[in-house]
Image (cartoon, coloured by chain):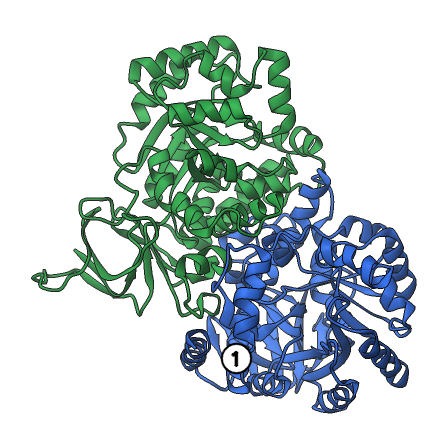
Chain colours: A green, B blue
Amino acid sequence: MLRLYNGLIMPMTERCSIARGEIWTDGDRIVLAGDASGRAMPAFEREIDLRGGLVIPGFKDAHTHSAMTFLRSYADDLPLQSWLFDKVFPLEARLNPDAVYAFTRLAILEYLSGGITASFDMYYHRDAYAAANLDSGFRSVICGALSAGDRVETAARDYEQYNSMGPLMGYRLGAHAEYTADEAVLRGLAELTRQYKAPFWAHNSETKSEYEESFTRRGMSPTAYFESLGLFDYGGGGFHCVWLDENDMDIFERRGLWAVTCPASNAKLASGVAPLGRFAARGINLAVGTDGPASNNALDMFREIYLACVLQKLALGDAAACPAESILYAACSAGARAMGLMDCDCLAEGKQADLAVIDLDRPGMRPIHDIAKNLVYSGTRDCVRLTMVAGRVLYEDGEFFVGEDAGRIYAEAEKYTKEICAQ
Amino acid sequence: MLRLYNGLIMPMTERCSIARGEIWTDGDRIVLAGDASGRAMPAFEREIDLRGGLVIPGFKDAHTHSAMTFLRSYADDLPLQSWLFDKVFPLEARLNPDAVYAFTRLAILEYLSGGITASFDMYYHRDAYAAANLDSGFRSVICGALSAGDRVETAARDYEQYNSMGPLMGYRLGAHAEYTADEAVLRGLAELTRQYKAPFWAHNSETKSEYEESFTRRGMSPTAYFESLGLFDYGGGGFHCVWLDENDMDIFERRGLWAVTCPASNAKLASGVAPLGRFAARGINLAVGTDGPASNNALDMFREIYLACVLQKLALGDAAACPAESILYAACSAGARAMGLMDCDCLAEGKQADLAVIDLDRPGMRPIHDIAKNLVYSGTRDCVRLTMVAGRVLYEDGEFFVGEDAGRIYAEAEKYTKEICAQ
């Protein structure tokens, strides 16, 4: 058993309220979150003095392509089409499982040092990806990414395989996007959603052209098209959701779908600003993701929550738009539910021990008028003192505990990057 | 003498190129920056192993209100007018020198932990402000902020006083803004610019209404109005510059004025996005600032350079707009020249030893395709290993060396915050 004491907790059982309290963990579970007074003290393996710091449930990166670390800063400041077709796609074609393993391990270091405790990932070479997560002790849910011509049987096999690898790994049914899928694949996936009573996910309305061209291809928006095929009968959601129209939002609202916003990527690729204010007004479920490091370029949820709030103010010309607490909650608690990690959404007895410790003795965290606003508007990853996943401390005071030396992880990532980019 | 070795340097003598090399300092000056092979080794007081890290000239925060740390997270997510008139102004009226000293010391910790080596500050209680900087060993230039009814003699006295306090402190002539000044004050300042052959600074065209209302008040834009009074005869510049028109840009270009962009503040207060692409096309001098922590809310130049690039892409709908290197250069090297710190703009023999050491062994800095892009697009303050001002290490490995315990600085800032906000 571990004990975290002498600090504050933001359990997110009731939005972003804060209390004095302790966290006790046993194995991968929380056994106490809150007031420990009057409780008999068990024999703890370790007692961690929070030194006045704050425990939060940890960020959930609800949309990413972890292994794209190898493309970070490789081809920025280019027009979107030449970036994608001349730079990204040719190199991705050269990927192999060993490279994806190395690049994913690098990404996990970035997640952990930024207080992220789980990712919702979509990429190639999924066995290597899963191994990198399990070897690191990190939690991830893979999202299927079927495209035109792919075999739906693959998705069924992946679903069975990755959902039976224990609590650190999961799989959700998904297509890459409306513009890359064909109707046969989507109808097959719809059949699987019914078979498994499972949600469906896809990139959705990331760019204006994607949204507009769907009307030419399908006679309707991507959201309406997915809906028309029955893909949302068991819920799910969309990644990006920059260009949803009111009818799309009707569908999201009625079906309880999740919009996963990726503000950094949408800004850097000049895709636009998702209408988070409209989502909030309608009560549409919101989660937050980084997208991959090729487009972002960081895997940093502090950046995302800051941008989500600030870009909404800028886009609406209203400094009061998109209050900080709502986005912090979406990024930490709601994101877990979006991914189906129902045991990772808050700090409470019986929940998975996924958490981050925020050092409030950093300049940007002072003074303390409002900790949630500090986290969103002046929080940075240098405030993250400790990150725990499933009861294991994987990051603490700048050091990683992921079963492999960080220096070796950097070196392996550099080696495979050179191999792939130099071919 | 100090030696920094076993790493890379980005001297910014030639934009953002990188070389292997060492930095040697003697007192507050650099005595070697580059290849040390063949040089006799002096007896160093200390040799700092860079462990493969990168030395940059340090960020220059070219527009800030440091002491506004006390308002961080106090009143966010409010409409601009109620934020300013109901929250900010009433509390600022309660400030006293001791409070400004405490709040400034807190700000300096934030600057240092983010690799910032100098600030260009505009605020009240300037003696206390100067003392906080000098006691910390930090470098700052005060910008005058005269408003309607202020005595121009004060500016003359401040000019003489703060410019004679040694190389860590300076003063530039300035008015708060067109909308807060009157013609008598501005004519007096114009006279001082001629007397001292000195540049003139002011908040300029931060909001659309400020720009538009200037036409009602003065019959022309703020820039044209300042120019018409002869205020720019010896150069200078403007803070924010979000709403400059083509005629304003003509003036900036012809006069060699500096536009200081503050993208985070402009976004959070929904003021807009400065036309950095137009500035670059015209060759207008650019520097970067955070603005104060009440509006930003961080004093973090990593955030600013990221936003400067990304918001430009978003605003122009062009992912190729505003390449990273140009903004990194503006934030580190050009900013020094904007502030008149001609000895702090690059790493070269004879220059002031103002620098930051970037740890490249952090996840967001890997792999290394392009270090400048890594710094701009995935750089965060957790990569800053060391910050040196005038040859003194003021921050290293998370610890501060500013003549006062950081814990005490936090406590003092909290104490005065409570006093002022509880009245």
Is residue B117 visible to us here? yes
- Disc 1, SS: loop
Q: Nearer the viewer, residue B308 or B46?
A: B308
Q: Is residue B3 left or right of residue A29?
A: right
Say which residue appears at 86% left-offset and 59% top-offset: B220
The furthest residue to the front: B216
Relative to residue A9, is residue A216 depicted above or below? above
Say which residue appears at 34% left-offset and 39% top-offset: A336
Q: Is residue B220 left or right of residue B33?
A: right
Say which residue appears at 62% left-offset and 72% top-offset: B65
Instruction: Kindly identify which residue carries mark 1.
Output: B94
Q: Dot 1: within a 10 Å radius of its alpha carbon, few (fewer than 14), some, or many (20 or more) residues?
A: few
Q: Nearer the viewer, residue A137 or B281?
A: B281
Q: Amino acid at mark 1?
A: Arg
Q: Is residue A73 left or right of residue B158?
A: left
The chain containing the residue under callout 1 comes to B
Q: Quadrant of residue B188?
A: bottom right
Q: Quadrant of the C terminus of chain A?
A: top right
